[in-house]
Amino acid sequence: MSHIIAPSLLASDFLHMADQIELINQSQADWLHVDVMDGVFVPNISFGQVLMPFIKKGCTKPLDVHLMIEQPERYVEEFVALGADIVTVHYEATRHLHRTIQQIKQAGAKAGVALNPHTSIQNIEDILEDIDLILIMSVNPGFGGQKFIYQTLPKVRKLKAMLEERNLNPHIEIDGGVGLANAESLLQAGADALVAGSSVFKSEDPVKTIESLKSIEKNKSY
């Protein structure tokens, strides 16, 4: 199965957001990644519920919604109702992670869990059977355009081995500093979904960049 490319709307030109979304529609991208930030869990504030209906209306791809917010359980149903196909919450942001995962699924979306760079994958060992996606942050969350943290690679290898040992296959998604320079290494390590923000939207030809990311082949096993 081919890997997933999920361009991050956070890196797009907000003045021309409709055109940027249509660009994604016409590209080989699989999902559109939507970063929701509250200024509490992360330093920055991005878009939220007000923009979601417009994003959903304009986008023909599944919406991969990443809630970088404290107590995400307060908003899960609302984001699903507004069009989120996947809702990912941070391990570090909710006290009752299992309950929140069940809440996402009951609302009708796929459930993901995100881990900050310093958070060990062992922390989610007991809920791996319950989740559809694990998002490994390869930068510290809250700002676009950061440099990739290379410690992510052994972390992904370890996670992939843990999943295979238990015969589980949730998506392993990488978010932060992902581009043509490191995409192949991430896929080789075991990732199968790549969030690409600046590397897509700041490139001279975003559609071509997505095509290039999509066409990368895993030449080696992790």
Image: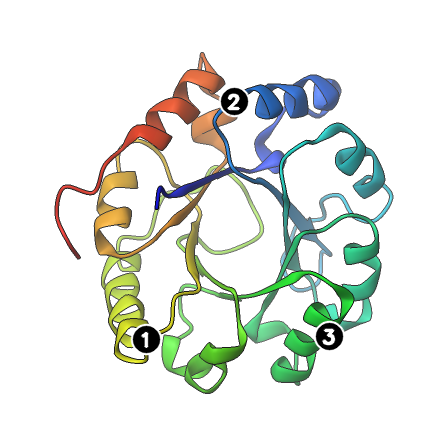
Q: Nearer the viewer, residue 199 or 124?
A: 124
Residue highlighted by disc 1: 167
Give the label on residue 103, or none: 3
The earlier-in-sequence mark between 2 and 3 is: 2
Q: Amino acid at mark 1?
A: Asn
In the rendered image, residue 197, in percent from the top left (x then y), is placed at 50, 35
Q: Amino acid at mark 2?
A: Ser
Residue highlighted by disc 2: 27
Check the image and report above or below for 203 versus 143: above
| Cα distance in 3D space between marks 2 and 3 | 32 Å
Q: Residues within 10 Å of mark 1 (few under 14, many from 20)?
A: few
The answer to whether residue 71 is seen in the rendering is no
The residue depicted at 76 percent of the width and 35 percent of the height is 55
Are the residues flagged by discs 1 and 3 in contact, CB closer than 8 Å?
A: no
Under tag 3, what secondary structure? helix
Q: Amino acid at mark 3?
A: Gln
Under tag 2, what secondary structure? loop
The answer to whether residue 165 is seen in the rendering is yes
In the rendered image, residue 160, in percent from the top left (x then y), is placed at 29, 66
The earlier-in-sequence mark between 2 and 1 is: 2
Number of numbered markers: 3
Check the image and report above or below for 192 versus 197: below
- Work out which residue is located at the far top of the displayed protein and give it: 204
| Cα distance in 3D space between marks 1 and 3 | 24 Å
The residue depicted at 58 percent of the width and 51 percent of the height is 142
Discs 2/1, front: 1
